[in-house]
Image: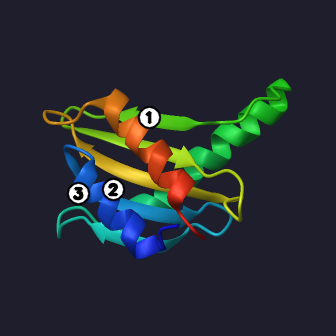
Amino acid sequence: MANLETALKECLSSIDGASAAALVDYTSGMALGTLGGTKDFNLEVAAAGNTDVVRAKLRTMELLGLKEEIEDILITLSSQYHLIRLLKGRGGNGLFLYLVLDASRANLAMARHQLRRIETELEV
């Protein structure tokens, strides 16, 4: 089992193009842990803002009566991918992993695969 710091470091080291990672509580909007980011990209603000994305999608699914679980939410920008993975099981309820990727270097399929693997090893 990986602790939070180890899991975030693994996100940045094992996922090509990853530049920032966070574990976020979408019930409060608080980042429980962050790694990466720059002075021009405030990871805490991005993590908090993406809680609104998760909440909106969950609310929409409820209104539609969808009985599905969200695996990932992908936001594509011209130079970045933002990948949100909702955690399941072992204390992960209400949490998501947030990953920022350089679009010119990232492989989305591999990033999703690696993030899924990191999720299974994460101890929260």
Q: Residue furthest front?
A: 1
Identify the amino acid type marked 3.
Ser
The residue carrying mark 1 is 74
| Residues under numbered marks 3 and 1 in contact, where contact means CB atoms less than 8 Å apart | no
Give me the C-alpha separation between circle 3 and circle 2.
6 Å
Identify the amino acid type marked 1.
Leu
Q: Residues within 10 Å of mark 2 (few under 14, many from 20)?
A: many
Q: Residues within 10 Å of mark 1 (few under 14, many from 20)?
A: few
Q: Residue furthest right?
A: 65
* Place of residue 115 in the rendered image (x, y in percent of width and height, measured from the top left): 43, 46
The residue carrying mark 2 is 11
Instruction: Name the residue rendered at 47%, 46% in the picture.
Output: 117
Instruction: Name the residue rendered at 52%, 53% in the picture.
Output: 119
Q: Nearer the viewer, residue 98 or 122?
A: 122
| Residues under numbered marks 3 and 2 in contact, where contact means CB atoms less than 8 Å apart | yes
Q: Secondary structure at mark 2?
A: helix
* Place of residue 111 in the rendered image (x, y in percent of width and height, measured from the top left): 34, 38
Give me the C-alpha separation between circle 2 and circle 1.
16 Å
Sequence-wise, the earlier of marks 3 and 1 is 3
Sequence-wise, the earlier of marks 2 and 1 is 2
Residue 2 higher or lower than 120, as above or below: below
* Place of residue 28 in the rendered image (x, y in percent of width and height, measured from the top left): 64, 69
Identify the amino acid type marked 2.
Cys
Instruction: Name the residue rendered at 20%, 35% in the picture.
Output: 103
Q: Residues within 10 Å of mark 3 (few under 14, many from 20)?
A: few
Res 13 label: 3
Q: Secondary structure at mark 3?
A: helix
Q: Is residue 114 left or right of residue 73?
A: left
Give me the C-alpha separation between circle 3 and circle 1.
20 Å
